[in-house]
């Protein structure tokens, strides 16, 4: 970004130029990934340029792990972006570090969101970022080898026993859907209350036990990176994996019609805790008045009902964040799977979601639990040791 804008500042950047920053995971920071993301941005820009035809939109990719530091450095030179498109958790962190500004007239913006997205994006009655799209968590599978996707984790195990190769992640964020399928979500959410940590947690043990048993099955494989699951499916080394809707776009480029999408397997009595990824817009703090106006216009063009519907239907890569937009299930089996994941699975855990996020989503929190689950699936620690480590995890990121 600094090289791109060398010699410029927020005072002398071209008035009709809008700078948008976005992250790419460090291990996926390749030309191919950037080109795939830029393709999506061209679609977004088309929507915006209908009403702002003389604007130049410049998009800049940052490595995820260094994005915050780099934007801080750029902002000190008055070279910070006008908009940041990233996940809700990253933008919350950016807001705490004063790298994005709250939206003006927040109440006008929040009217377009349902309660869940409002609760995620409002701090002290201010909209700190504007939710844009939802990437539901689903399963991606090869329909040449799997004729009927598993509806329960019991069916998933049977599928593996029949010879179907199944890929799972050891990342907490990617694997916690199974905590829902084994009925452990209420117990995990209760861990926020320290008084409950020493009480027996039979469902958490049942969940951890299921993961350990899965690691022993011949055709269920655990991977440390989600990108490995994607690569193994497209290379025909796996038949079924967990994925999100944006990753499905990438997979379809290789697999074509051989790829099918389905909701994640539920339990016998409980829903999968499908964990969506929510992308939103944050307003950079380094804009001139004219650039801030352009930034607001860009967000408005893409979060209003018409813009949301057009973008969602043209890509089948995500669900709209605007509550007024209804994507009919009958329009696509893929969109039906996304709708079921978000509305039937994710939203069934509205009460527990904030507490689980509070318990796990700290800077050290997820890595600490990731380590526990990796060691569990590798046979390094026992089920009881994993349960103890998980339930003694401190929501401040310590054990």
Image (cartoon, rainbow, N blue to C red):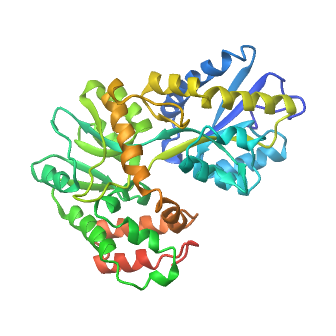
Question: x, y percentage for residue 221?
Answer: 25, 55
Considering only vertical position in the picture, is 300 above or below 102? above
In the picture, the quarter occupied by the N terminus is top right
Q: Is residue 333 visible?
A: yes
Looking at the picture, how far across and down is residue 186, in whole percent?
39, 68
Task: Name which quarter of the figure residue 60 lies in.
Answer: top right
Q: Position of residue 160 (x, y in %)?
A: 15, 51
Residue at 15% from the left image edge and 57% from the top image edge:
218
Image side of residue 164 versus residue 324, left or right: left
Name above or below for residue 13 compared with residue 83: above
At horizontal 37% and vertical 44% (from top left) the residue drawn is 341
> Is residue 382 among what the camera can see?
no
Residue lying at the far left in this picture: please name it: 162
Residue at the (35%, 30%) spot, across then down: 329
Q: Give the image quarter of residue 251.
A: top left
How many numbered discs, if any?
0
């Amino acid at each position: 970004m600094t090289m791109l804008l060398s010699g410029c500042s927020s005072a002398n950047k071209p008035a009709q130029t809008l700078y948008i920053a976005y992250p790419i995971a460090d291990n996926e920071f390749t030309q191919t990934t950037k080109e795939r993301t830029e393709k999506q941005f061209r679609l977004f820009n088309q929507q915006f340029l209908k009403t702002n035809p003389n604007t130049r939109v410049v998009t800049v990719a940052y490595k995820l792990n260094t994005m915050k530091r780099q934007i801080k450095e750029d902002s000190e030179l008055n070279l910070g972006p006008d908009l940041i498109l990233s996940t809700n958790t990253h933008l919350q962190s950016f807001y705490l570090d004063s790298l994005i500004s709250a939206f003006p007239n927040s109440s006008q913006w929040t009217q377009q969101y349902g309660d869940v997205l409002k609760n995620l994006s409002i701090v002290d009655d201010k909209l700190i970022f504007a939710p844009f799209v939802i990437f539901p968590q689903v399963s991606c599978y090869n329909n040449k080898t799997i004729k009927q996707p598993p509806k329960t984790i019991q069916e998933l195990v049977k599928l593996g026993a029949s010879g179907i190769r199944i890929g799972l992640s050891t990342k907490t964020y990617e694997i916690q859907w199974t905590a829902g399928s084994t009925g452990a979500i209420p117990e995990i959410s209760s861990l926020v209350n320290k008084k409950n940590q020493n009480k027996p947690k039979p469902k958490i043990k049942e969940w951890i036990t299921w993961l350990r048993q899965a690691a022993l099955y011949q055709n269920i494989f655990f991977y440390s990176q989600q990108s490995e699951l994607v690569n193994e499916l497209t290379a025909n080394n796996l038949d079924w994996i967990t994925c999100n809707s944006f990753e499905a776009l990438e997979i379809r480029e290789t697999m074509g019609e051989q790829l099918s999408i389905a909701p994640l397997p539920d339990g016998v009595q409980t829903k999968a805790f499908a964990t969506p990824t929510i992308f939103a817009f944050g307003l950079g703090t380094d804009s001139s008045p004219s650039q801030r106006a352009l930034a607001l216009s860009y967000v408005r063009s893409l979060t209003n009902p018409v813009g949301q519907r057009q973008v969602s239907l043209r890509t089948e890569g995500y669900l709209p964040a605007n509550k007024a937009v209804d994507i009919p299930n009958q329009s696509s089996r893929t969109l039906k799977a996304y709708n079921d994941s978000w509305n039937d699975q994710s939203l069934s855990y509205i009460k527990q979601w904030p507490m689980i996020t509070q318990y796990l989503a700290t800077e050290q929190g997820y890595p600490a639990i990731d380590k526990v689950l990796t060691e569990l699936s590798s046979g390094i620690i026992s089920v009881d040791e994993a349960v103890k480590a998980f339930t003694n995890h401190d929501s401040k990121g310590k054990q």
